[in-house]
Amino acid sequence: MNSAASGEVPRLFGRQVGRSLILGWLVLLCSALAACGPTPAPQIEITGPTMGTYYAVKVVQPAAGLDTAALRAGVEQVLAAVIAEISTYEPESELSRLNRNPSTDWVPVSANLYRVIAAGQRISALSGGAFDVTVGPLVNLWGFGPEERLDAVPAPEQVRAALERVGYGKLELRADPPALRKQRGDIYIDLSALGEGYGADRLAAYLDGLGATNYMAAVAGTMRVRGTNAKRQPWGIAVEQPTPGQQAVQRILPVTDQAVSTSGDYRNFFEADGRRFSHHIDPKTGAPVAQRLASTTVIRPAGADSAMMADGFATALLVLGEQRGPALAESEILAAYFIIRDDAGFREQTSTAFERLHAP
Ligand code: ADP
Ligand code: MG
């Protein structure tokens, strides 16, 4: 069973998220830290479907001439461009064509696709392979890819066969001119763990280009924020309690000029044989990670690829689990916030960099 409402959301990319969940989350986002204060500044805001989930953009004190319709048109154009580059849900995207290409020679790729894959390779190396963009065959085998969802545990020999195709070391990158070489023709790259962040970064670049200085640009649980909200206060980002099918806030994080991404195991999963299988796959075992770490949130200073890196690291920390995740957050000086299941419900854990950020 998928925790999200199925059917009503087009699956273009990544996971599905129920409309009510996201809208509820947005309401929280809007009201967070905005309960009091001076008269609100003018703001335009839009939301809509993208990548199998939702985007949300707010621009405070928009420039003259920027209205809701113009913003929507601009934002949707940016997101369509992102999908055309890196979505495995769009058969004619550059990535889908690359995945179908059986060549083991150097294949030229666009600078943008290169950038996203290279970010993935960096996170793979830093996480010792817990994060791996070549995990696609396993993601698809377990039913979390673009193909039909089976909600069933695959046979061990199928997992073994898929594992042979997985390994970030089987992918070589060349920066100039951007190109990629597969060690096996059947390598299949899945950029879903970076896509929301890459989308948020592209939206932020678009908004910067419009001269916006106070905005929030989110693709599902990954976002870029700049400046302040309509109440002239830091943006409040609600981190959900990791309870499937429910909507409760665990903590509200005040952020400004930052990228934030939350990864969780409580939205996209299925249940079989009394067990829950979530969409985070351990590339070592070939199976979904099963553990107590339920949610990871990573915050980075805003910058060119900050949401993409926050997105990828949030997934990497989740795959690494409650021991190795926090250890990587310390060694990489990542501002990270963890929610871990325990007998009493949930407990929180934070990295040193996170504590520094939120020091009074
Ligand atoms: P979350 O925010 O919950 O981490 P994402 O969409 O960012 O969700 O990432 C999960 C997606 O990443 C999965 O649906 C799958 O496509 C892909 N994925 C799963 N396991 C891994 C992994 N070990 N490394 C990289 N990508 C993964
Ligand atoms: Mg992610």
Image (tube, helix red, strand yellow):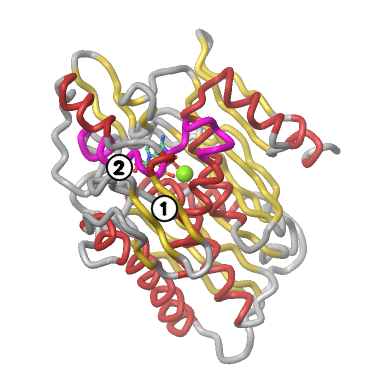
Q: Which residue is mark 1?
A: 23
Q: Where is the C terminus found, in terms of image quarters? A: top right
Q: Residues within 10 Å of mark 1 (few under 14, many from 20)?
A: some
Question: What predominant SS class does the magenta segment belong to?
Answer: helix
Q: Quadrant of residue 169?
A: top left
Q: Where is the N terminus found, in terms of image quarters? A: top left
User: What number is the disc on residue 39?
Assistant: none
Q: Percent from the top left, x then y, of residue 346? A: 54, 19
Whole-Å distance between the Cαs marked 2 and 1?
29 Å
Q: Percent from the top left, x then y, of residue 163? A: 28, 30
**Looking at the image, is mark 2 or mark 1 earlier in the sequence?**
1
Residue found at the far bottom of this picture: 65
Q: Quadrant of residue 225?
A: bottom right
- The residue sitting at 59% across, 59% down in the picture is 305
Residue found at the far right of this picture: 360
Q: Secondary structure at mark 1?
A: helix
- The residue sitting at 18% across, 50% down in the picture is 7
Q: Secondary structure at mark 2?
A: helix
Q: Which residue is mark 2?
A: 136
- The residue sitting at 37% across, 54% down in the picture is 181
Whether 188 is drawn above or below 91: the answer is: above
Q: Quadrant of residue 213?
A: bottom right
Q: Residues in magenta?
A: 124-142
Q: Percent from the top left, x then y, of residue 278? A: 33, 29
